């Protein structure tokens, strides 16, 4: 495993089975077992203080910036991808071109198990994404969303 371009702003707890590259980790970040979390030299992924990332999650910020706020809870088996498409087949890309774009997850948000967050999504602060959701649209602060594709279920009271 190659580890490079890591900035640590305090203490982080990273399971030995996880892989991280091209990231800025806030103080108190916890990364569980078998996670793959990476940006690139051009798009360094940012994770805020006291954020937790559950086991078997993949956060792919290779093609565009991903910024995860403070005190975010990401459950197990979550896939956050700043690029999407059939990158192994140039021929298939003629029909389904690669899509890429920035992703932001606001402070104090909670991403449920088995959820997928696609490129060009911004989730505000205090957002909840229900388990098994596919998020392909942006949502404001205090939104509770769920489904495939995710839709607004309700707004939390401030």
Image: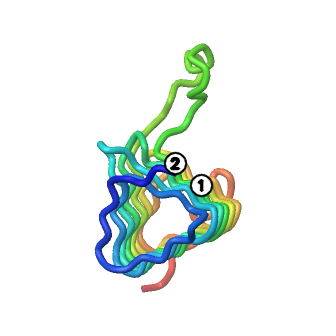
Please give the name of the residue rendered at 43% of the width and 43% of the height, measured from the top-left corner. Answer: 62
Across and down, in percent, residue 127 comes to 49, 71
Residue 87 falls left or right of residue 27? right
Q: Residues within 10 Å of mark 1 (few under 14, many from 20)?
A: many
Which image quarter is the C terminus in? bottom left
Residue farthest along the bottom direction in this orientation: 158
Label pair 2/1, CB-CB below 8 angstroms: yes
Please give the name of the residue rendered at 50% of the width and 70% of the height, measured from the top-left corner. Answer: 143
Front residue of this view, candidates 155 and 15:
15
Q: Residues within 10 Å of mark 2 (few under 14, many from 20)?
A: many
Across and down, in percent, residue 84 comes to 54, 38
Q: Quadrant of residue 58?
A: bottom right
Front residue of this view, candidates 123 and 67:
67
Answer above or below: position of 139 versus 108.
above
For disc 2, the marked residue is 81
Residue 3 falls left or right of residue 148? left
Can residue 144 be seen here? The reply is no
Can residue 134 be seen here? The reply is yes
For disc 1, the marked residue is 79
Residue 37 falls left or right of residue 5? right
In three-dimensional space, the C-alpha distance between marks 2 and 1, rounded to whole angstroms, equals 6 Å
Please give the name of the residue rendered at 49% of the width and 56% of the height, measured from the top-left corner. Answer: 37
């Amino acid at each position: 495993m190659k580890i490079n371009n890591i900035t640590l702003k305090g203490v982080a707890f990273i399971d030995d089975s996880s892989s991280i590259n091209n990231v800025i980790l806030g103080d108190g970040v916890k990364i569980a077992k078998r996670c793959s979390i990476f940006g690139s030299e051009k798009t360094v992924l940012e994770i805020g203080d006291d954020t937790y990332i559950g086991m078997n999650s993949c956060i792919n910020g290779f093609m565009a910036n991903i910024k995860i706020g403070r005190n975010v809870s990401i459950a197990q088996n979550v896939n956050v991808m700043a690029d999407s498409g059939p990158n192994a087949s140039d021929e298939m890309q003629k029909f389904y071109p690669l899509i890429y774009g920035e992703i932001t997850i606001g402070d104090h948000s909670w991403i449920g198990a088995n959820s997928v967050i696609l490129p060009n999504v911004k989730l505000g602060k205090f957002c909840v994404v229900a388990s098994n959701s596919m998020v392909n649209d942006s949502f404001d602060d205090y939104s509770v969303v769920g489904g495939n594709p995710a839709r607004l279920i309700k707004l939390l009271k401030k």
